[in-house]
Amino acid sequence: MSVLNIRGRQKLEGFLSVQGSKNGALPLMAAALLHEGTTILHNIPHILDVHFMIQILEALGCICTFEGGTLAIDASVLQGAQLPREQVGRMRSSIFLIGPLLGRCQEAVTYQPGGCSIGERPIDLHLWGLRQMNVDITEEEGTICLSTGGLTGKEMTLAFPSVGATENILMAAVKANGTTVIKNAAREPEIVQLCLCLNRMGAKIQGIGSKTLRIDGVTALHDSEWTNQGDRIAAATYLAAVAACGGEAVLHGIEASQLYSVLSVLSLSGCEVFCGTSSVCIRSLEPLRRVPYIRTSPFPGFPTDMQSPILALFSVVPGETVIEETIFENRFQVVGELGKMGAQIETDGTRARICGVRMLHGACVRARDLRGGAALVVAGLAAHGTTRIEDCSHIQRGYEDLEKRLVRLGADIRLEEETQTQSANRA
């Protein structure tokens, strides 16, 4: 079991390169299945979810070579369209593969996906969209079988601008017969990147960045290369850490326009924020001010993935802040762990009311999901004393070398691997 030990109250200063996007890399990897050849992806982060996805691709017959930050996927020959149950149970993003498999093989077999337990996150909208495109779907005891006699383009309106559903339907539509129109599509930067990458591979997608995507089906794609964008959520997490601890840092490799809603909150709290062409500088030298109300919503709104780290930040800002979560109903499970550190947070359904305290104190806490784990890191960095975060594999699913990057900024943080025997003895 991975454990992070943090001695808090260290000012954070320096320069940091942002990792490649987790939420961008996984659909790009899935899209490689659409092409009977090689796709080369650069700036791919070395995180657990990427390695889980590589295992799935290899189980399907792909040849994957991952060196440095470059991943080459040779999908010339597939051995089948059934996803491996174990890996599917480890990660939510395995669901992205059914759209490409239907486009390539006209069938797919998968299971209810695993990953973080931050809410129900049903895949109903994914399946609804695929059914519109002439896909037959049967579900029995957690197994989902999908098949089609030929994907057919369809005009559809999503009930909610789901990122995953948009990506899955979009990838299936690339090789469908005719034209597919997705209305109320998600507009997240990861969607824009996926569309641009697919077009480079030979797809025909219009309306990129808008609420309406038009995909004219093609019969084949070609070899291509793509450089994955910087991770906006990882960048925002580091910005929240600097805000909580005080200091000044420059983050390179991120588009500030993708962070507008987060930067706005940080500015309102009293941080100074400066944006460059592909960098963001934050300066937090004065006591922070409360921000009365924050509400998560689809892009360009405040990202749900940043709700937990911002919850931790405002735990140490005097006054009351209310955060409303509109996307995932179980995003507040980190509240109990923050409470062990002295945070005063009350939850009521989809709202959390934070009464900021002067200082948190170190404690032994557990990362129960990816972004909740990141929130505990922010809290630990700001807390007095030592914080021990257990079960950090959740954090490693999405953050590449988080502790090493924070050390470069002056944090006192150390990652250790605890054996099962040590864990049992401590218990």
Image (tube, helix red, strand yellow):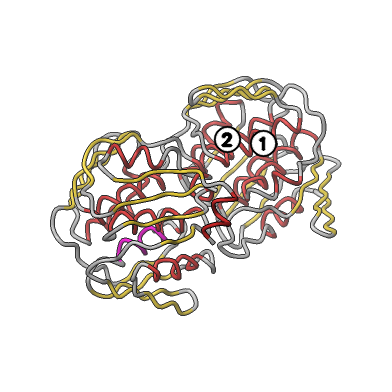
Quarter of the picture containing the C terminus is: bottom right
SS category of the residue bearing label 1 = loop
Instruction: Confirm whether residue 134 shows in the render.
Output: yes
Which residue is label 1 attached to? 174
Q: Find residue 68 and report its horizontal and vertical position in percent.
A: 49, 23
Residue 28 numbered tag? 2
As for residue 229 lying within the magenta part, the answer is no
Q: Which residues are magenta?
A: 308-314
Q: Nearer the viewer, residue 107 or 405?
A: 405
Residue at 26 percent of width and 50 percent of height: 242
Q: Nearer the viewer, residue 229 or 421?
A: 421
Q: Nearer the viewer, residue 95 or 18?
A: 18
Q: Is residue 194 left or right of residue 267?
A: right
Q: Badge 1: few (under 14), some or many (20 or more) residues near its Cα, within 10 Å?
A: many
Q: Find residue 34 and report its horizontal and vertical position in percent.
A: 69, 31
Q: Find residue 359 and report its horizontal and vertical position in percent.
A: 25, 66
In three-dimensional space, the C-alpha distance between marks 2 and 1, rounded to whole angstroms, equals 14 Å
Give the farthest residue toward the left. 286
Q: Main secondary structure of the magenta part?
A: helix
